[in-house]
Amino acid sequence: MERRALRTASSRRTRAPARAAGAAALALAFGVMADESAPPAAPIPSASPARWFDPATAPFIPIPEVDIAPHSGLTLGVIATVLYNDERGDLNQIFAPDVIHSQYFGWGSRMRAYEYPSDDTQWSVVGGLKQRVEREFDARYVTGLVRDTRYSWSIETIYDRSGTPRFFGLGNDSLKANESTYVDNQERIDASLGRNFTRELQLAYLIRLRNVSVLPGVIAGVPSIETRFPDQTGIGTMHEVDQRLILTYDTRDSPMVPRGGSRYLLYGGFASRRFGSSFADSSFGVDLRHYSPLDADSTLALHAALRHMPSARGAPFWAMSSLGGDRSVLGERDPMRAYGEDRFIDHNLLSAGVELRTRAMNFDAFATHVSLEFAPFADVGKVYSDTDGAPFSRLHHGFGLGIRGVASPFVVGYVDFGYGHEKLSVFSGLDYPF
């Protein structure tokens, strides 16, 4: 089953904050991943104050937090990360509270708890708030990841209120000069059930209940969405009941840290007023991923996606296809790391990406085996309507470098630097972008 990220801030996961290079480099150097959490630690009781300065004995890992992702303003803070390993030495629990200060929303705090009890099951709870505007809560449980049993299932419940999303208008040629902002308030429940015919082949049903309120923006100096786009569908409050069937053929050697194999995914779905949605639309698409090990330390990762909406005349902008940001979210958005989240929005989407993931260093830190990776990457893609002509024309592109810390078998922390036509973008979080 596909892990979800919130539509208007993917990597809030979601909202996974992006960290600056300095903070991420520090975290990765110690085998610690920045995002909504970080990896490896093994607290050892000691009466000596020196244990606070020794990574092998400190009761928690203090990680500087610097958020400079596109659109989010400057956020500074510190994460106090506590990590636990199982008897095999694999990371299986993360607890990571933080204290932060946001340029836009004042002081705040978050609590994160992640647990990986087995290769097959994961759960997480993330919650937090700031002095002004922003609130978040995300609880998720998934089992059947390796598909050894007949069924796989997951459930996730989300409340997210974010003041940083941007909207530039619809279309592949939307202008940076038309930037607007809004407050995105969402309540959401996702549930999925998959029938596993083999370990490779699965047919899953996904239902999403979502209430979205697009409210006036609060970022000083950026026009609010209703003033720049007063007639845009999606402003105000709307409801969605989205249903999908997803057929997956998956030969990857790991769902979290793949080094070989492929995942081919075909899906189709709809929202209907008969089932409680404020609007009706339909969509189908494909998502293709392939991983080729070039040698013991290098993997070539390829990704391509196509999404088409045959009917979407009454659909809000936040339910359309989106290009931008650092993460692929099935049936919603695809990465373009040279731009911020949701930079280009329209009915249909075509995108592709390639990364060369190379392990530069392997070491043990905080009782966990860690690999440091460098990954030069390139992204191309576009959004378009049915009247835009050839889908391969007017492609946006970007390139950059990813720096990743991998605590196998579950956790990947990354910092990606992307550059395109507008300016340098910096993202960080957990998990590979695809």
Image (tube, rainbow, N blue to C red):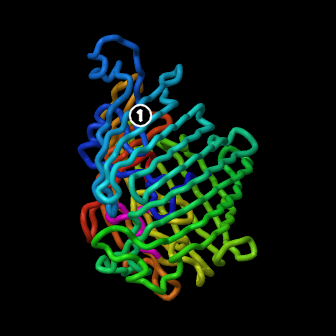
The residue that appears at 40% across and 52% down in the rendered structure is 130
The part of the chain drawn in magenta is 335-345
Report if residue 376 is visible in the image.
no
The residue that appears at 58% across and 78% down in the rendered structure is 315
Tell me: residue 345, above or below residue 67.
below
Q: Residue furthest front?
A: 131
Q: Residue furthest top?
A: 47
Report if residue 156 is visible in the image.
yes
Describe residue 128's horizontal placement relative to residue 66 as left or right: right
SS at mark 1 in the image: loop
Image location (x, y in percent) of residue 185: 51, 64
Quadrant assignment, res 217: bottom left
| Residue bearing mark 1 | 39
Q: Residue type at mark 1: give it.
A: Pro
Local packing at callout 1 (Cα closer than 10 Å; few below 14, some 14-19, many 20+) is many
Describe residue 121's horizontal placement relative to residue 373 as left or right: right
- Let me know if residue 42 is in the magenta part: no
The residue that appears at 29% across and 47% down in the rendered structure is 76
Image location (x, y in percent) of residue 325: 39, 61
Quadrant assignment, res 314: bottom right
